[in-house]
Amino acid sequence: SSGSEENDVVVIGGGPGGYVAAIKAAQLGLKTTCIEKRGTLGGTCLNVGCIPSKALLHSSHMYHEAKTSFAKHGVTFDNVKVDLAEMMGQKDKAVSTLTKGIEGLFKKNKVTYLKGHGKFISPSQVSVDTVDGGTAVVNGKNIIIATGSDVKGLPGITIDEKRIVSSTGALALTEIPKRLIVIGAGYIGLEMGSVWARLGSEVTVVEFAPDIVPTMDGEIRKQFQRSLEKQKMKFMLKTKVVAVDTSSDVIKLTIEPSAGGDQSVLEADIVLVSAGRSPFTSGLGLENIGVETDKIGRIPVDSRFSTNVKGVFAIGDVIPGPMLAHKAEEDGIACVEFIAGKEGHVDYDKVPGVVYTHPEVASVGKTEEQVKELGIAYTVGKFPMLGNSRAKSIDDAEGMVKIIAEKETDKVLGVHIMCSNAGELIHEASLALTYEASSEDIARTCHAHPTLSEAVKEAAMAAYDKPIHI
Ligand code: FAD
């Protein structure tokens, strides 16, 4: 093992933050070891997050399209059925191919991979209980904590991953539930709710707050909720779950208005608890070296990702900021660049967010509500997908593009897109924000025809002047 030899960098956790940091460190010529307890690389994202959820979203979308839309396109067949075991098998294959792929990248870049649970003994020493039952001590001049996050439970509700599931259980159900109740209308709850709604479950989403996905631009959010309602998802907003009774075959949820009031009972076969995620540092021995955490368990870091203990850094879901895989990766690269004596930078105002439902919702930069609150004078350019020829030609024209620009300078402040493939379309907006482009810059950039991306160009035209096709 990497035992007593000294590493330049030791990374604890092999998720998108940790594995990317390890590869980048090795690429910069630093001797690097990555410790991961799961037995596979890729962390939450590859094993029980981004990747398996996108696999199931795609498979369930194919089924749903086959059932509801193919006939319109002249493609007919007698009987469409779901083979859930096969569908789950395809998802599992996607996960294992990708996690093994990262092992390959570690070999290629000469990152030492140690499978086991790491715990600090000192700021430069980690003891590891290896998955094969041994122990090792790993030394590092710099240690990066990339231990990620875990499911946040709700008081009084025990997640058994069978009937009361977290996202992890919801990605591995063996039967299609007749009634699924989702607690929490964040993006994970909506994505998993969509999967099972498409496969035939009656899905009800119970949310404490007055809105679904609170970070979303309000106008887009309203359209998005209507779209999900058309897909037969039900929403009970401003509602809290006060008790869950699993003593009989049918799960009974007692709910009441968030502000208090009359209680009622909902019945479900499966309940998905998706009320957020918590930073994960349990068993890491932070107390042994005095690394501080905040009220909700996150590790505060300075602008160079250093914790309060010299030589100990932290990145990804375990530090403040959006809990997203690409943000964790950016953290990892910048942190390692600092360690290598270079400059690193992550702009947290320009991290795109995507909900991978159908249509997808993607955004980057500020919402209209945020711009208003900041008192910035602004213009808005909107373009409905109904005016986009590609969307019309494939009969998939739900949604819109909305661009918010500063009135005085025309600088793009925020872009919000709801349409199929919005998660791909958003990156020209990210680039625009990063390079402080104006809406006119986007509008004068030649976009290929016919593409969905033309809707971004037209929304930009609408922001500084007038669109052509609406
Ligand atoms: P993690 O991925 O959580 O990795 C941390 C790793 O550290 C884990 O593998 C853990 O086993 C290991 N570890 C912890 N403690 C120790 C220890 N002491 N010793 C050794 N190893 C340890 N994000 C997106 O950007 N896009 C999406 O589409 C998306 N979809 C998601 C869907 C779901 C259902 C979920 C749950 C999450 C999703 N996310 C998505 C969020 C994304 O998964 C996280 O933001 C991302 O994984 C964070 O990366 P990380 O490296 O900080 O931590």
Image (spheres, grey):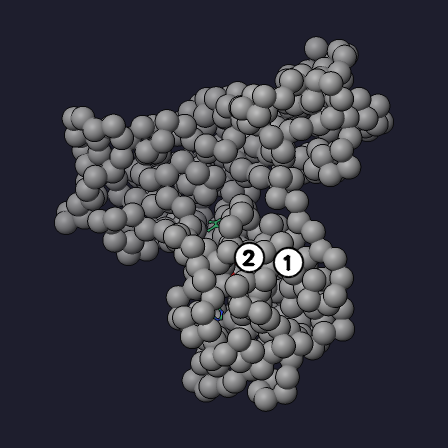
Q: Are marks 2 and 1 in contact (CB under 8 Å)?
A: yes
Instruction: Identify the residue position indicated by label 2 in the image.
Output: 301
**Residue at horizontal 60 percent and vertical 34 percent from the top:** 362
Q: Is residue 332 left or right of residue 173?
A: right
Residue 163 in the image: state x and y as whole percent: 28, 50
Residue 9 in the image: state x and y as whole percent: 64, 73
Residue 178 in the image: state x and y as whole percent: 31, 39
Residue 441 quadrant: top right
Dot 2 alpha-carbon crowd within 10 angstroms: few under 14, some 14 to 19, many 20 or more: some
Q: Secondary structure at mark 2?
A: loop
Q: Nearer the viewer, residue 375 or 59?
A: 375
Instruction: Identify the residue position indicated by label 1 in the image.
Output: 304
**Residue at horizontal 29 percent and vertical 45 percent from the top:** 270
Residue 373 quadrant: top right
Q: CA distance from mark 2 to mark 1?
A: 7 Å
Q: Quadrant of the C terminus?
A: top right
Q: Nearer the viewer, residue 51 or 86?
A: 51
Q: Quadrant of the N terminus?
A: bottom right
Q: Secondary structure at mark 1?
A: loop
